[in-house]
Image: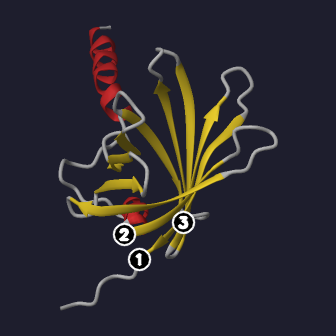
Amino acid sequence: MRLASLALALVLISAPAAAAPQVPPAGAQAGAELEPMKLEAGVWDAVVTFPASTPDGQPTTAHGVQDNTLRSNGSWLINEFHIEGMPYEGSGMWGWDAATRRYVGVWGDTNEHRMRQDIGYWNADTRTMIWHTDLVRQDGMVTPMKMISRYDGDRRTFDIFAVGYKTGAETLLVHMDFTRRAAPPAS
């Protein structure tokens, strides 16, 4: 009986360790997980389209520039964005979190009163990144958001949607078409 109890105790003690996901050691280099950051690196010209605010209205268009710089051996991307002729600018950082095995990001801009935290999911087959976040508005209400980036060489799109709590319906808030600027010639 004592031997059986000892064997059971050893199994129970070792079970959580055996079931725990294997996390790469700190500083380990990611592989294919870094591909989305590489695709987005560089300086991009943006055409920003805001949908019409009334049923008979017209969309509004603006132009912007986004400068994305790889950091920490390509694990993180620093993002700076501004819209020309408007008092709008934003900054963020995103990348692969090996501990949680997902993409994470933070963003702050002149429209938000707090740092937004995003969780992203990459589909390598469609070259699409889907981000989810909860936007805490200034009135304290929370709006679920969904953002979709689609990559096609030196072109990409970025759409931001508000997601309805009860219906799950997605309302497009902004659409952006990006074109990567040619890299400057080597000196």
The mark tally for this picture is 3
For image coordinates 30% across by 31% down, the residue present is: 17
Taking the image as shown, residue 22 lies to the left or right of residue 51, namely left
Residue 67, given in percent of the width and then of the height, sits at: 33, 63
Taking the image as shown, residue 60 lies to the left or right of residue 73, namely right
Residue 43 is labelled as 2
Residue 62, given in percent of the width and then of the height, sits at: 54, 57
Label 3 to label 2: alpha-carbon separation? 12 Å
Specify the quadrant of the image occupied by residue 165. Answer: top right
Instruction: Give the camera-side residue of 48 and 73.
Output: 48
Q: Earlier in the sequence, mark 3 or mark 1?
A: 3
Instruction: Give the camera-side residue of 176 and 97.
Output: 176
Where, quadrant-wise, is the C terminus in this rendering?
bottom left
Residue occupied by mark 3: 156
For image coordinates 33% across by 43% down, the residue present is: 22
Residue occupied by mark 1: 181
What scheme was used to colour the molecule? secondary structure
For image coordinates 36% across by 46% down, the residue present is: 90
For image coordinates 33% across by 55% down, the residue present is: 79
Q: Secondary structure at mark 1?
A: loop
Residue 6 is labelled as none
Residue type marked 2: Val
